[in-house]
Amino acid sequence: MKRVICGLMALVLCACGAGKKEVMQSVKDNELLQEKTVNDYVFKLQYMPHQKISEDTALSYFRLNISNTAGVPLKGTDNKAFSYGLDTLFAVVNGTDTITPLDINRIANGTINGVEYMLVFDKQTLYAQPQCKLLFKDWLFTQQLISFPLTGKAIAHIDSLSLNI
């Protein structure tokens, strides 16, 4: 009897803990790491799952990295338009609703051949979206509308893996 209980406890402990590799593989499998190339620019969108040490679990974070395919430095990115008023350029849209971001910050990551933004959305409204798209009205680089498909269930799944729920 003791062996059965110990075996079940070991099985439960192994099943509960998801490693960082598993979380990142699930991010890729659920299309929460996407890359699009438009007019010689590469747009990489990545969902940033919550960590156990984070106290703020009511928000969802995305990183959008924009670079050019030639690898040369982007000119003019020191203009204020690349850092301020960005909340009007992004939205999560489904068939009946539009969710605006709570905050968007340009990340100072030290690269000269691109820019990176941190997009912050309310987690509960994203969870409620069965199928939606993150839209980027790109008036800064390509003057096009760029969309990234998202699924609320995939975001909830990634969060449960990263928090070991």
Image (spheres, helix red, strand yellow):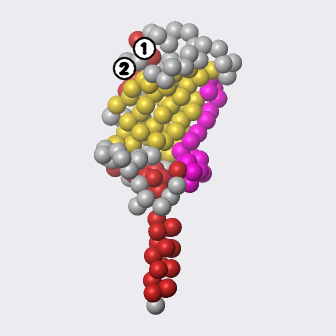
Can you identify the residue that label 1 sits on?
Answer: 81
Considering every residue shown, the one lying at the far bottom of the view is 1
Name which residue type carries label 1.
Answer: Ala
Question: What crowding class fits label 1: few (fewer than 14 Cα within 10 Å), some (14-19), or many (20 or more)?
Answer: few
The magenta segment is 21-42
Residue 103's spot in the image, x, y percent?
A: 34, 31
For the residue pair 93 and 19, the one nearer the viewer reads as: 19
Please name the residue shown 41% across and 47% down the image: 51
Residue 89's spot in the image, x, y percent?
A: 43, 26
Does the image show residue 26? no
Please name the residue shown 50% across and 45% down the image: 150
Name which residue type carries label 2.
Answer: Gly
For the residue pair 113 and 3, the one nearer the viewer reads as: 3
Considering every residue shown, the one lying at the far right of the view is 70
Q: Are marks 1 and 2 in contact (CB under 8 Å)?
A: yes
Q: Which mark, residue 85?
A: 2
Is 69 located above or below residue 121 in the figure? above
- Distance between the alpha carbons at the discs numbered 1 and 2: 7 Å
Among the 4 quarters of the image, the one containing residue 93:
top left
For the C terminus, the image quarter is bottom left
**In magenta stretch: residue 146:** no
Does the image show residue 76? yes
Question: What crowding class fits label 2: few (fewer than 14 Cα within 10 Å), some (14-19), or many (20 or more)?
Answer: few
In-image side of 47 versus 55 (left or right): right
